[in-house]
Image (cartoon, rainbow, N blue to C red):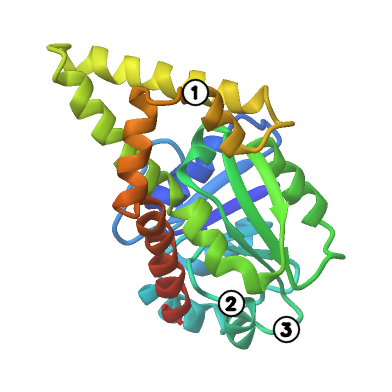
Amino acid sequence: MNHGFIGFGNVAKAIYKGLQSNKDHSFRYLSKHNNSTELNASSSLPELIDFSDVLWLCVKPQDLSGVLEELKQLNLNSKIVVSPVAGVPINYIEESTGAEVCIVRIMPNLAIAYQQSVTAFCSNNEEHIYLDDLKKDLSAVGRLVEINESHFHLYTALFGSGPAFLLSLFNVFKRKIIDLDIEDSVAQDLLVDLLKGTTTYLENNKQLKIYQLIENITSKGGTTEAGLDYGKKHNLEEILENVLLETEKKSQRLF
């Protein structure tokens, strides 16, 4: 199957990196701003479309309307058009490409490069000849979650933007690890080990609720309880929920 990327920024590069191990795939891209030495560039949009079975719309939301205006003039009937563009509904793309075109909306995160993404998926055509192959590809680069398109804004906040929010929290831990007079590179390794251990603890105790796992770590009158009480007093959970809410609202306002 041939994959063509319109735009080759961070998202496209991550998708390509995740998919490239499949030797049955070939890749090309078209980009005004980003270059790659890993795969061939097409000289024009018609050339890229002629090559592609799957066409990836990997442009910024503000640039999408111009790309769709160009696509409107071209024959996409046999293609799958995949959009990871935040906030953009399928029907918006349909208005330019035509309702007969198979359009897939996804929301991955950059962990797709390491085959660890949690990717949302929905489509306007479940019968397309390449759709099952595309689902298999996306399942091979992480976990594929088919959801109703109405939930994409919240999904974007949780799983698209979520890694950035978690990394912001992790960075606080890293700064405190460095305060132990541990060099930066070792501090990052220790942080990774802490996170691996915590997720392993979570994964191996799925029969318990998260609050129960927290209780298992917390001794009455101890250090963990003191920190948790401070977080409750200063509405830490509410702040985190509001971070997600604002992200969801922004996704809703993009289009």
Which of the two labelled residues, at mark 1 and mark 3, occupies the earlier sequence position?
3
Q: Is mark 2 on a helix, strand or loop?
A: loop
Numbered disc total: 3
Which dot marks residue 89? 2
Where is residue 60? Give x, y as percent.
Answer: 38, 67
Badge nearest the viewer, 2 or 3: 2
Residue drawn at 76 percent across, 43 percent down: 136
Horizontally, residue 195 falls left or right of residue 77, namely left
Which dot marks residue 217? 1
11 vs 229, nearest the viewer: 229
Badge nearest the viewer, 2 or 1: 1
Query: For mark 1, does the 10 Å Cα neighbourhood hold few (<14), some (14 to 19), or many (20 or more) residues?
Result: few
Toward which corner of the image does residue 81 lie, by quadrant?
bottom right
Residue drawn at 51 percent across, 60 percent down: 156
Badge nearest the viewer, 1 or 3: 1
> In whole angstroms, how far apart are the C-alphas of marks 1 and 3?
54 Å
Q: Residue pushed farthest right?
A: 127
Where is residue 167? Give x, y as percent.
Answer: 34, 39
Tag 3: amino acid: Ala
> In whole angstroms, how far apart are the C-alphas of marks 2 and 3?
13 Å
Q: Residue pushed farthest bottom?
A: 95
Residue drawn at 57 percent across, 38 percent down: 211
Q: Is mark 3 on a helix, strand or loop?
A: loop
Q: In this view, does 255 lie above or below 52?
A: below
Q: In this view, does 155 lie above or below 2?
A: below
Where is residue 182? Give x, y as percent.
Answer: 17, 11
Which of the two labelled residues, at mark 2 and mark 1, occupies the earlier sequence position?
2
Residue 79 seen in render: no
- Disc 3 marks which residue? 99
